[in-house]
Amino acid sequence: MGIFAQSLFATPPRVGGVQLTPFSAYHAQALIELDSPYLLPDVEITAGDTTAALIVCSSLRADGLNPVLRFSQSKRVRASWWLYWVFHNHETIAGILQDHILSSMRPPATWVDVEGGGGSSTGASWPYYAVSVCAQELHGIPYLHLWDMPLAELFCHKAIIGERNGDYKIAESELDARKRRAESQKESDRWQR
């Protein structure tokens, strides 16, 4: 399934009884604020990290960081999560959660137009940047809704805006066509043997 179809039709998994919501810019920004290892390469992930990420990834922007604060400030909530980990395998859940986050953060493939486009860096964190660019161009979608939009869908809108502005060309369909041709060639070669 291509990134554009995935951004609309993929449904977030239910992980160990916790229903995740579509991964959004809000989730990414919250994980950045928490210094979550789910956004860092090659960092050990603890059950506490996974608990915080599960809490964030099952909430919406309107919740803010209140669910994480409840976890950190309430002995009862921490005890219920401790009990949760007694009955659930951390490695399995961490793997599923990491797959959900990483697959949700895949933007569409694009070709950079060397002669045109290419703005300068603003210094803003990438979730803010993506939401800001889309908010400036997608006037029919309320700003707060962009924060809860599935991140892959937000990336697709941003890619279309970038292509329309001449920053690059979306390469998704061309790459898919190349992939189909390569698979067809492999199949043809296999039958000729």
Image (tube, rainbow, N blue to C red):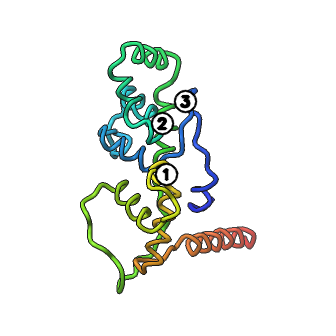
Residue at image mark 3? 18
Percent of width and height locating residue 109: 48, 68
Contact (Cβ within 8 Å) of mark 3 with mark 2: no
Label 3: how many Cα within 10 Å (few below 14, some 14–19, many 20+): few
**Screen quadrant of the C terminus:** bottom right
Image position of 131 with respect to 85: above or below: below
Q: CA distance from mark 2 to mark 1?
A: 14 Å
Residue drawn 54% across the image and 37% down it: 20
Above or below, 163 against 47 in this view is below
Reading the chain from its start, which is encountered first: label 2 or label 1? 2
Mark 1, Cα crowd under 10 Å, few <14 / some 14-19 / many 20+, is few
The residue located at (37%, 26%) in the rendering is 48
What is the C-alpha distance between the residues marked 3 and 1?
23 Å
* Closer mark to the observer between disc 3 and disc 1: 1
Q: Amino acid at mark 2?
A: Ser
The extreme left residue here reads 123
Q: Which residue is mark 1?
A: 145
The residue type indicated by label 1 comes to: His
Q: Secondary structure at mark 1?
A: helix
Q: Position of residue 63 (x, y in %)?
A: 43, 35
Q: Is residue 140 above or below residue 90?
A: below
Image position, residue 47 (x, y; %): 39, 26
Label 2 sits on residue: 59
Q: Quadrant of the N terminus?
A: bottom right
Please, what secondary structure does the residue beneath circle 3 have? strand
The tag earlier along the polypeptide, 3 or 2, is 3
Q: The residue under label 3 is which amino acid type?
A: Val
